[in-house]
Image (cartoon, grey):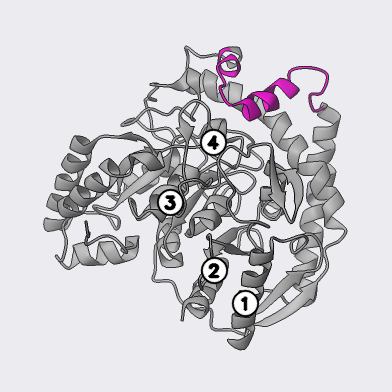
Amino acid sequence: MEFISDVMGAVELLSLMENGKISAVEYAAELSVKVSESGGLNAIQSFDKDSLMKKAMDADQKRQHGTGGILCGLPFIAKDNLNSTDFPTTAGTNSLMGHTTSSNAGAIDDLLKEDAILGAKASMHELAFGITSNNAVTGPVRNPVNMDKIPGGSSGGTAAAVGRGIFPIGLGTDTGGSCRIPAALCGVVGFRPSTGRYSSEGVVPISHTRDTVGTIARNVSDISLFDGVLSGNTFKKIEPFLDGITLGIPKEVFFDNLESEVEKVIQTQLSILEKSGILLKEISMAEIWSHNEAFGFPVALYEVMKDLPAYLEKYVANVNFAKLVSGIGSPDVAGVFASQMGTDAIPEAVYNEAINTHRPAMINIYNKVFSDNGLNGIVFPTTPLTARDIGEDETVDLNGTKVPTFPTYIRNTDLGSNIGAPGISLPCSGETSLPIGIEIDGLPDQDQKLLSLANTIEMMLTS
């Protein structure tokens, strides 16, 4: 069945609504059919057709009276670890099934104030602690390009729903790559803003130092549209990056041991960018990696043991931390929490050193590399490999060797998370057996510059 909305992004949809070419009700009706036909994907955790249609009718009336916000009538999907009053917020775990909060997450409220419509909650990796979205409690989310493959995670449901064309745009969260990795594996755009740019209120947490709400969409303009609302800036049409562009190509880590197809496709993309006038400059950040290793996992593991109980105390009075942990169904997630319950727990001294020594060192090194080389961004493969089969939660094959699944997939996205830098994954152009992402990272708190740069690069890669 063909739909008007099959290849429509958020900006395009809003333009058509504004010009009377399609109504919110018409779009919502098509969306409802798509949801009903997509059950095998397992991207949707909660959906209510009647509620969606009512909200769409209200949006059409607001638009007719000229009282609608800039997102009036636009449906979006939100990862199921963002609080919502209309749907349960489960984080994909047993103890929170059916639980509905009395307030929305701050990011959801920001979108609703501009009359966007929360259309559904998205399936996810349990408690956001993984990159496969193979959830033993709610079932595996499947890749929209190949249903036998993982969609990435932990925001796998959002990426799969956008990749399949069910929703034009959605919210995820990103702690170590959880918006960018599934975007790369599902062939869409995934954006992690600078840490602190968007509200973190009402999000089931892992790490307040590393967590952020992020967006997944079909193009950079749509990402920029949501960024304007979520960051409190007035949205303006994104402008091309007009100055000369210099991108850094890191010599260490990012390009190591790539799957052969990823290597080939990424080099083709870089060649396109170079022929389009971008200066590609080899850079070194060798000294940053020891700090990164001492920071990433210790901070996430230490903070989740504080931040998650605090969330439960504030929002879920009838579920304490012990009950939540005992109800975890996914073996990989259960193992993470079990490791922090005994003598292997991250010591406070290690955490303090990570925060006070290693993070400042990383930020200084990163900023200096940018300034010394006149960089506008760094560019690299979002993941070293394409999507693997569902069920390969512990190890995957990479160039004939079994490697650990989680650290391999987050290898390239982790650094940006740890220093709070913005990063965006774009789908690579050309024919590939499975989607491949190319990521551009910028300097912390220079998100609009990165989005302008990404918009220009997107045009180069798709022209």
Q: Mark 1 points at which residue?
A: 268
For residue 59, side relative to residue 356 (left or right): left
Q: Earlier in the sequence, mark 1 or mark 2?
A: 1
For residue 359, side relative to residue 194 (left or right): right
**Badge 1, how many Cα within 10 Å: few under 14, some, many 20+?**
some
**Badge 4, how many Cα within 10 Å: few under 14, some, many 20+?**
many
Find residue 3 and report its horizontal and vertical position in percent.
22, 59
What amino acid type should be assigned to the residue bearing mark 3?
Pro
Marks 1/2: CA distance?
A: 9 Å
Q: Are marks 3 and 1 in contact (CB under 8 Å)?
A: no
Q: Mark 4 points at which residue?
A: 134
Out of 392 and 127, give the one closest to the viewer.
392
Residue lying at 18% horizontally and 48% vertically, measured from the top left: 29
Marks 2/3: CA distance?
A: 16 Å
**Badge 2, how many Cα within 10 Å: few under 14, some, many 20+?**
many
Find residue 143 and report its horizontal and vertical position in percent.
47, 48
Residue lying at 56% horizontally and 61% vertically, measured from the top left: 425
Q: Do the residues labelled 4 and 2 touch (CB within 8 Å)?
A: no
Q: In which quarter of the image is residue 442?
A: bottom right
Q: Name the residue under label 3.
A: 144
Q: Are marks 1 and 2 in contact (CB under 8 Å)?
A: yes
What amino acid type should be assigned to the residue bearing mark 2?
Cys
Q: Earlier in the sequence, mark 2 or mark 3?
A: 3
